[in-house]
Amino acid sequence: MADKIVTEGLNAYFGDVRAVKNVDLRIPERAITAVIGPSGCGKSTLIRCMNRMHEVVRGARVEGRVLLDGKDIYSATTDAVEVRTRVGMVFQKPNPFPTMSVYDNVVAGLRLNGERDWNKLDATAERSLKLAALWDEVKGQLDASGVSLSGGQQQRLCIARALAVEPEVLLLDEPCSALDPIATAKIEDLLFDLKDRYTIVIVTHNMQQAARISNFTAFMYLGELIEFDATKKIFENPERELTEKYITGRFG
Amino acid sequence: MVAEASEHGRLDHAGTGMAKARKHSSPIGPLASTGDMLFKYAVMAVALFTLVLVWFLVLMMLFEAGDSIAEFGGGFLIGDVWDPNREVYGALPFVFGTLLTSAMAILIGVPLSVGVAIYLSELSPPWLREPLSFLVELLAAVPSVIYGLWAMYALRPVMVDTIEPFFKTVLGWTPFFEGEPIGLDKFTAGIILAIMIIPTVASVSKEAMMAVPLSQREAALSLGATRYETTRMAVLTYARSGIFGACILGLGRAIGETMAVTMTIGNANLISWSLLDPGQTMSSLIANNWGEADGLQLSALIEIGIVLFVIALVVNVFARLIVGRFMKAVPTTGGGL
Ligand SMILES: Nc1ncnc2c1ncn2[C@@H]1O[C@H](COP(=O)(O)OP(=O)(O)OP(=O)(O)O)[C@@H](O)[C@H]1O
Ligand SMILES: [Mg+2]
């Protein structure tokens, strides 16, 4: 299996604070990779380095290399905008555009790319909302504001929005933390279906979820990548004691 | 004696006065001592005095304008003649002048202000943002007579030699640019007004944009938006009510502005759509004629003042409602890429 994203000696800073330390990680293509670890260990920061979203925070910077299909996304010749169209992201906190309707939120990315054909926009909106398990709940209120939805619905709206532009890689930062078990199961089904076509990286605090849906798991602790392997291996027979302690809940 | 009195006061609050104290409690709790009570009433008296003063002002103006109101009635607002020789007075040329120059100020000033705000909030490096914002706010504090002087000695020659001939060449076929470029006209007045509202509109708009959460910008960026697209789809839309409020504040300033307009507008009591013709606003009319006016003309001038007062009041109240709501609704931190 080819590697879609490779990080080499990746360090991420907030000012003087180093939140990600010397991470070498290979994200396999067309598979789900879970990133786990205690709160504050740098999971979000790590995946935000993969679509050049880290540098958006003031005072933040990145050292090292991140290769997307073998090409360094931090090289001087790479356009961050192009990287982000190829590597989509769903954020930890839902962030729909409050002044846009549900519909406009979903097709916002397509419109950015200049798509004006209503049939195509309609079709994409419906397909993306269905994929995100939101269609049935919002099909009657596509004109309502994006923030009129519940927190969990907003998160699924953001998933639909990210899917609509059909990125090659999908980075998801705890996408299910605000969802009920039913919606969570739907999202997990969705990710499972998508992995034949997309490369998926998902940050999660839910061990069962990581074990259920991911093919590979990365365990982080205090900014370092402690262990990365097939999910089965990590959960059944980890190399490192720290990993085992975290998995089994005997931590700290 | 004093100690006893204050002790008594405290007891009273702790006992029977509890409910009352809670009902109109100040942020730091009930008032305890006699000194505090005295202070409270003194401050209250001052506050009431200002209120009374405003009412007094309004009543006096209505009284003084009585002759004009009786003479011209509602026709005053649509009367287009201002002739002291025939003792005929109408407000229309000046309402027209005020609205036209204010509209120009908004039309020219708002895009520039929003541009400045976008630069300050979205594009400028952090080390430049603070000093630059401060400078922009400082411009709001420059007395308007200074703007007027600048307009007469620096802006007018440019208007006469370059800007007005240019517009006359390009748009001379429209009714808006008929006549000769003289530089003391509605065009110059509108431009100086536009410049004068920039500090206010830009800094309030900047605040509104800075209040847009970073997560909104991230949402746009993650969809592959450029800086420009991010500003358009995530920042301007989110901050639109604040920006709108800023524009209304600017409009309020433009409507009421007197000195700089009086110095540049040419002071002619006529209604003309051509920006190259001189004109008159409500405030410049008052400033120009106050000295010599008496009798019915003075009364009419005061009625003009009432019209101006009402328009300015409505615009300002409207602006404050909008800006106040947005200032409360969103935290004023964050922002920037
Ligand atoms: N904007 C920021 N400015 C400064 N430091 C930050 C910022 N965001 C995160 N950090 C620091 O970077 C470290 C990693 O944060 P990160 O958000 O990546 O953790 P996380 O693993 O995603 O945690 P969680 O599971 O709680 O989401 C933390 O120690 C945090 O304090
Ligand atoms: Mg996180």
Image: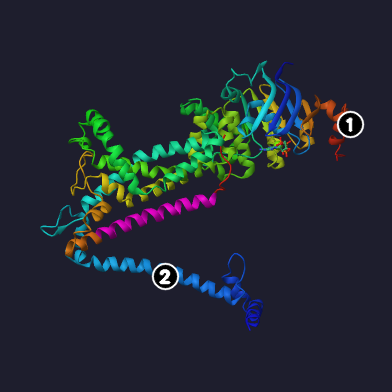
Q: Is residue A73 left or right of residue A231?
A: left
Above or below, comparing residue B69 to residue A124 in the picture? below
Q: Say if B292 sits above or below A113 in the image.
A: below
* Residue topped by disc 1: A241
What is the quadrant of residue B154 in the picture? top left
- Secondary structure at badge 2 equals helix
Residue sticking out furthest to the left: B86
Rendered location of residue B17, percent (x, y): 62, 78
Callout in the foreground (2, 1): 2
The answer to whether any part of residue B157 appears in the image is yes
Q: Secondary structure at mark 1?
A: helix
* Residue that mark 2 sits on: B49
Q: Is label 2 in contact with label 1 (beta carbons under 8 Å)?
A: no
Q: Chain of mark 2?
A: B
Query: Label 1 sits on what residue type?
Result: Glu
Magenta stretch in the rendered image: B303-329
